Amino acid sequence: MRQPYYPERMLERRTQAERRSDSQARLVAAAIRLLGTRGYAGASLAEIGREAGLSRGLVNHHFGSKEACMRAVVTAIRERARAHLSSDLRGVAALDDLFDVYFGGLVDREDPSARALYVLLVEGITATPGLRDAIAETNMVVRRLIVEMIGDEAADPDASAVVVEGILRGVALQWLADPDNVELAAATDAAKAAVRGLLAA
């Protein structure tokens, strides 16, 4: 069978696009690791480039600024978290899965995404307001996802989604700030019970 003909320039372009995508993914992963271990100040463009095994110039080339890089980080964390959720579940079962995945991500020492996200949440509402839109968009995406999960099990799915997201964020912040005094497994069970009561009201 005859192989398709691809002009050399087309193959070169595809290879450059793949290299660009790989570099961006490495930079975002490096930024997540640094945010999760050193905080926002410790995730400078130079450090991100070094952590990724690339130059600082490439961070500027791909993102243009630290804030733009951090917006890409927020998007990547959101997409990574969504990929871990079961798409087959609805209603209470879906919300149970959400709590398990979300709170499970907090204690996963191999994946600093949850810690990185909370660094950016705090940064976006304090010292770096340029991140606020990315954080607001993430919150909106989470609420839409929760509304899909709830379906018609709540009288006001939008308001219920705000409460569920509030439970997720609130418990996570408490545990991240004081893990020795917040029993996450018990809090997860309590959160599930609270949501059942919310949906039954």
Image (cartoon, grey):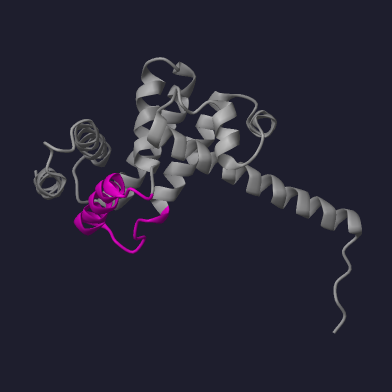
Toward the bottom, the furthest residue is 1
Depth check, front residue: 133 or 46? 46
The structure residue drawn at horizontal position 11% and vertical position 36%, both measured from the top left corner, is 181
Q: Position of residue 179 (x, y in %)?
A: 18, 38
Depth check, front residue: 15 or 44? 44
Task: Count every numbered label the image shows and give the total.
Answer: 0
Q: Position of residue 120 (x, y in %)?
A: 40, 28
Residue 178 position (above or below residue 189): above
The structure residue drawn at horizontal position 59% and vertical position 35%, both measured from the top left corner, is 50
When asked about the image quadrant of residue 2, the answer is bottom right
Highlighted range, magenta: 83-110
Q: Position of residue 199 (x, y in %)?
A: 14, 46
Q: Does the rendering let one see residue 151?
A: no
Residue 158 position (above or below residue 45): below
Residue 130 position (above or below residue 178): above
Residue 170 located left or right of residue 79:
left
Residue 138 position (above or below residue 45): below
Quadrant containing the C terminus is top left
Q: Does the rendering let one see residue 77?
A: yes
Quadrant containing the N terminus is bottom right
Residue 100 located left or right of residue 21:
left
Q: Position of residue 6 (x, y in %)?
A: 87, 64
When asked about the image quadrant of residue 7, the answer is bottom right
Is the magenta region chiefly helix, strand or loop? Answer: helix
Toward the top, the furthest residue is 127
The structure residue drawn at horizontal position 24% and vertical position 51%, both measured from the top left corner, is 152
Depth check, front residue: 110 or 11? 110
Residue 183 included in the magenta stretch of the image: no
